[in-house]
């Protein structure tokens, strides 16, 4: 069957399509019904099933006689370490860790926060939670203590599993002090913490609260897999929304297993035993779906890469890892390729390695610019596939399903919707627009299995954020179009979310931090185009009348404040002081117009603007920073 036939077969019988896909999963009780309509546009999949994620990701491969196959390859150019873990070793390690967690009181439904860098123990911690039916929430290491505290207060974890440190090329990230600081800031306190001591930095443990990863597993009874209901939350992953309060995306257990497993062959074109590498971080959705769960559930070998595309040690690292570990499918972010291309435009490093194992490359996380795709195709001589997805969906909404049929590439488009997604472009009134016209991208409900059923502790916010604007649809927050051949194009966000080096960030959250500076009266943060990172945040500050501090000092303090409150990952470095912000007569800041000016694009003078002269002042400020050229 080709793409169209598969898509049509889903459309003709969505429930039958996904029920067929459930056959690839090991069930304790197989689902008897696919979709549950809970009313008010809320849906769930496979709710009456009983299943365990860890069993499917680990134990079943051992039972099937593949225990000696490598499950995880750890390759860390930062620490000069390489290690392989087989499925049977992984099963034993995860069962012991789960046993130790259970001995300390962690049970099905309890939340566990995981704050770890790219080491195999991060995956083991996730799987140990899954084994017990505990709900993990992984927090990215580039976030500051305050962001961790916000997540602790929302998820209310019984335990936190952390590493002593992370390693960035230029510095050690001191996880333990960040963790201690977060627990001090948060109202909720975990019962206990488990600390994985890395040799690069041994952290001080707090007696009675902190346990050593190895010590606390000593002599415990290994835990068996605990069956959970199909709609039990597998995990919570916080992602940026419009405000400083992140959204806790819930991943439902059964749908997650079914959908991810389906994508491994049909989208990523790998068979069990093949090596699949997603060069992301477990703190992001890509890491959850395609470093940990997807490849392991499907019986692949996954790679945990602790390094950067460039500088660890050079722009040939990706190719070295692919060649050395025989990677068949590689997944990264466009920004990573831009970084490599900048250092090695002619691909001199590429020619140093035998890349005959590599069959296809996937890009996601931000818009893939045609230059980068063409460069990668020319260097690697394999299909380079852009695909579009979100933390909320957990797997691709649109892509080129290479395991089914390779569609012709159209540069600038992540190809066509995957089965499960009825993607439509709507105008402001919620009416579908003609092919080739721009509008809001929405998905007709219900969403497929594995996508978010709601937000953690925030059902009203879920409905308001996703279901209210276009009744009967899920609002993606992206704008774009579908052409006459059915190819989807993603052009921009319709909200305050920006994408910096493939990291999703909220300008609203940065504004909240800037506004807390005592000298700042008003502020705006926008995302300006950046040739490496796609976008960079830029702050505009209006200071209180009578502020005596030098502008440069306030700017420096504000840059520091965002780093302290949100984290280095915000990459907040561009900031300026202006007298006034451009606004509509009703007081809404014209951020979109500011972005157009910064990027040197044509823009229409907004009819509702209060005082057009302010735009000239903004342009001048931008020009002094090297923008608006
Ligand atoms: N822990 C702690 N700090 C982190 C971190 C982590 N896991 N990840 C990034 N940071 C820090 C960086 O050290 C940097 O700090 P600095 O301001 O002190 O230099 C800051 O956060 C910004 O990081 P980043 O935006 O990633 O910039 P960079 O200059 O370090 O690297 C790239 C640029 C393009 C090489 C890098 O962004 C990259 O590899 N991006 C790919 C992202 C990706 O794969 N995303 C997954 C989505 S699919
Ligand atoms: P995240 O939740 O971090 O995966 O970010 C999701 C957002 O990143 C989407 O809503 C898009 O705005 C953007 N995005 C992800 N993949 C793509 C892509 N292939 N093309 C364009 N934008 C993308």
Image (tube, rainbow, N blue to C red):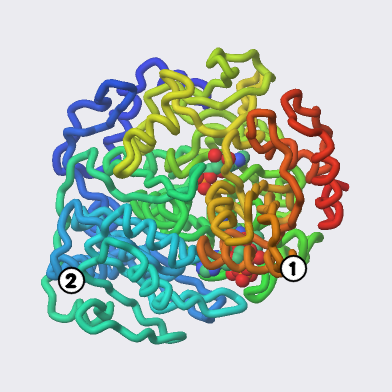
- Residue of label 2: 100
- Decide which of tag 1 and tag 2 comes sooner along the chain: 2
The structure residue drawn at horizontal position 18% and vertical position 41%, both measured from the top left corner, is: 229
x, y percentage for residue 203? 37, 84
x, y percentage for residue 313? 65, 76
**Which numbered disc, 1 or 2, marks the residue closer to the eye?**
1
Return the residue found at the far right: 629
Q: Quadrant of ligand 2?
A: top right
Which picture quadrant has residue 370? Answer: top right
Q: Tag 1, which secondary structure?
A: loop
Q: Is residue 267 above or below residue 190?
A: above
Residue 256 in view of the camera = no
Q: Is residue 287 above or below residue 425?
A: below
Residue 149 in view of the camera = yes
Relative to residue 447, is residue 384 drawn left or right? right
Relative to residue 592, is residue 176 drawn left or right? left
x, y percentage for residue 61? 27, 56
The structure residue drawn at horizontal position 27% and vertical position 81%, both measured from the top left corner, is: 212
Q: Tag 2, which secondary structure?
A: helix
- Residue of label 1: 550
Label 2 CA crowd tier, 10 Å (few <14, some 14–19, many 20+):
many
Which picture quadrant has residue 489? Answer: top right
The structure residue drawn at horizontal position 57% and vertical position 79%, both measured from the top left corner, is: 171
Relative to residue 231, is residue 395 drawn left or right? right
x, y percentage for residue 221? 11, 71
* Residue in front for this viewpoint, 299 or 210: 210
């Amino acid at each position: 069957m080709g793409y169209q036939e598969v898509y049509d077969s889903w459309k003709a019988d969505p429930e039958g399509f996904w029920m067929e896909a459930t056959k690839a999963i090991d069930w304790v009780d197989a689902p008897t019904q696919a979709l549950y309509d809970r009313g008010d546009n809320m849906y769930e999949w496979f709710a009456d099933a009983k299943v365990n994620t860890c069993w499917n990701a680990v134990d079943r491969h051992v039972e099937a006689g593949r225990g000696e196959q490598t499950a995880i390859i750890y390759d860390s150019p930062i620490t000069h370490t390489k290690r392989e873990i087989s499925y049977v070793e992984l099963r034993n390690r995860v069962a012991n860790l789960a046993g130790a967690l259970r001995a300390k009181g962690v049970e099905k439904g309890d939340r566990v926060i995981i704050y770890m860098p790219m080491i195999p123990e991060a995956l083991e911690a996730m799987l140990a939670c899954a084994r017990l039916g505990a709900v993990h929430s992984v927090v990215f290491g580039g976030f500051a203590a305050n962001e961790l505290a916000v997540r602790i207060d929302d998820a209310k974890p019984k335990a936190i599993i952390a590493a002593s440190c992370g390693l960035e090329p230029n510095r050690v990230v001191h996880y333990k002090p960040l963790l201690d600081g977060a627990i001090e800031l948060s109202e909720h306190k975990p019962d206990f913490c488990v600390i994985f001591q890395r040799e690069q930095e041994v952290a001080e443990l707090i007696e009675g609260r902190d346990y050593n990863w190895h010590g606390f597993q000593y002599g415990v009874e290994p835990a068996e897999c605990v069956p959970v209901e199909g709609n039990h939350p597998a995990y919570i992953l916080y992602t940026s929304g419009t405000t400083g309060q992140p959204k806790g995306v819930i991943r439902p257990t059964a749908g997650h297993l079914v959908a991810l497993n389906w994508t491994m062959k049909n989208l990523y074109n790998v068979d069990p035993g093949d090596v699949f590498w997603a060069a992301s971080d477990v703190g992001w959705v890509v890491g959850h779906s395609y470093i940990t769960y997807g490849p392991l559930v499907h019986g692949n070998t996954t790679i945990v890469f602790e390094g950067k595309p460039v500088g660890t040690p050079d722009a040939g690292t990706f190719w070295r890892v692919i060649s050395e570990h025989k990677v068949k499918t590689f997944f990264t972010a466009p920004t990573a390729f831009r970084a490599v291309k900048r250092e090695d435009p002619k691909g001199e490093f590429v020619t140093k390695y035998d890349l005959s194992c590599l069959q296809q490359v996937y890009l996601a996380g931000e818009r893939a610019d045609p230059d980068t795709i063409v460069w990668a195709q020319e260097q690697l001589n394999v299909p380079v596939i852009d695909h579009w997805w979100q933390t909320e969906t957990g797997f691709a909404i649109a892509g080129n399903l290479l395991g089914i049929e390779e569609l012709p590439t159209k540069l600038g488009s992540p190809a066509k919707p995957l089965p499960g997604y009825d993607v439509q472009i709507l105008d402001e009134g919620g009416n579908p627009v003609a092919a080739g016209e721009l509008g809001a991208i929405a998905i007709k409900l219900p969403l497929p299995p594995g996508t978010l059923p709601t937000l953690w502790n925030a059902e009203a916010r879920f409905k308001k954020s996703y279901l209210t604007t276009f009744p009967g649809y899920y609002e993606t927050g992206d704008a774009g179009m579908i052409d006459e051949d059915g190819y989807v194009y993603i052009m921009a966000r319709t909200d305050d979310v920006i994408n910096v080096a493939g990291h999703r960030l909220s300008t609203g959250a940065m504004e909240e931090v800037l506004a807390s500076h005592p000298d700042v009266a008003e502020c705006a943060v926008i995302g300006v185009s950046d040739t490496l990172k796609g976008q960079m945040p830029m702050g505009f500050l209006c200071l209180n009348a009578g502020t005596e501090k030098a502008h440069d000092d306030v700017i420096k303090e504000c840059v520091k404040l965002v780093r302290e409150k949100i984290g280095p990952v915000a990459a907040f470095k561009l900031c300026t002081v202006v007298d006034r912000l451009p606004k509509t007569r009703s007081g809404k800041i014209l951020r979109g117009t500011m972005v157009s000016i910064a990027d040197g694009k044509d823009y229409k003078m907004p009819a509702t603007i209060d005082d057009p002269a302010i735009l000239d002042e903004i342009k001048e400020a931008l020009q002094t920073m090297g923008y608006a050229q």
